[in-house]
Image (cartoon, rainbow, N blue to C red):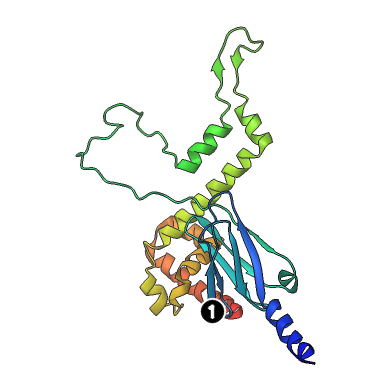
Amino acid sequence: MILWLILPFVCFSQKEIIRGKVIAETSVSGVLVVNLTQQTQVSTNDSGNFTIKAQSGDLLIFSALHLYRKRHLVEADDFRQTLTIEMEIMPYEIQAVEIERGTISAEDLGIIPKGRRRYTVAERRLKTATDWNPELGAGTMIGASLSLDPLLNALSGRTKMLKNELKIERFNRDVTKTTWYLSDQMIITEFEIPEEYTTDFRMYLVENNEFRTILKTEKETLIISTALRLAPSYKLLIADEK
């Protein structure tokens, strides 16, 4: 009788525990796992493993400084097997260091031609991987030699990976750019968005095609007014998550 009385409570407590693993092509130690519904959080170990209490319908948020954030809505099957969460690497820009050197530039010295396009890290990697680099050669049937690297990169999937990295780099750049016009204090006080959602709101804005187009104009008044107009729909979104 005692066993029959205890068994339902044991089973119930086991169903509340989710055992999961975060995987990525980089370190997965210390990834923050937040149960937004229950307001609890844990961190992954060196292997990316974690356990957290949850119920069906809870919203889990996975985040780390070096990884692109991911959301997961808890389902019944998540309690029966290990929950695997795949996360993508988030490239980030190292803060530039300014050096006092007057007005002399590499273009002024003739080291690089004036007006030449400057590439970001991700743009440079993609260009290198996809550039056929034609060179004049001798002894070839067409009088020129072509690098096979672009073909090999395409077949191996490296080109696709680099395109995704470039997409993430540009997204992060635009998210950072929003801080020029929208301070955290403005988002909290004027837009009435909770402090813990300021970064998420910036991402929400950049995911909007209209806002991203307006952001390119660098017109502060227009950018702020557009963000203010999109704020109510975002607040409805996070209200559903709660």
Above or below, 200 relative to 240: above
Bin the neighbour count of mark 1 within 10 Å (Cα to Cα): few under 14, some 14-19, many 20 and up.
Answer: few
Q: Secondary structure at mark 1?
A: loop
Above or below, 171 relative to 111: below
Residue 99 picture location, percent across and down:
24, 43
Nearest the camera: 39 or 5? Answer: 5
Residue 55 picture location, percent across and down:
67, 79
Above or below, 69 relative to 156: below
Amino acid, disc 1: Gln
User: Residue at horizontal 58%, vertical 26%?
Assistant: 132
- Does residue 56 appear in the picture of this structure? no
- Quick check: 1 left or right of 134? right
- Does residue 69 appear in the picture of this structure? yes
Tell me the quarter of the picture where residue 224 sits. bottom left
Nearest the camera: 170 or 99? Answer: 99
- Quick check: 111 left or right of 84? left
Residue 216 picture location, percent across and down:
45, 55
Residue 20 picture location, percent across and down:
64, 64
Tell me the quarter of the picture where residue 237 sits. bottom right
Q: Quadrant of the C terminus?
A: bottom right
Residue extending farthest front: 2
Q: Quadrant of the N terminus?
A: bottom right
Q: Which residue is mark 1?
A: 39
Nearest the camera: 203 or 217? Answer: 203
Tell me the quarter of the picture where residue 119 sits. top left
User: Residue at horizontal 41%, vertical 73%?
Assistant: 187
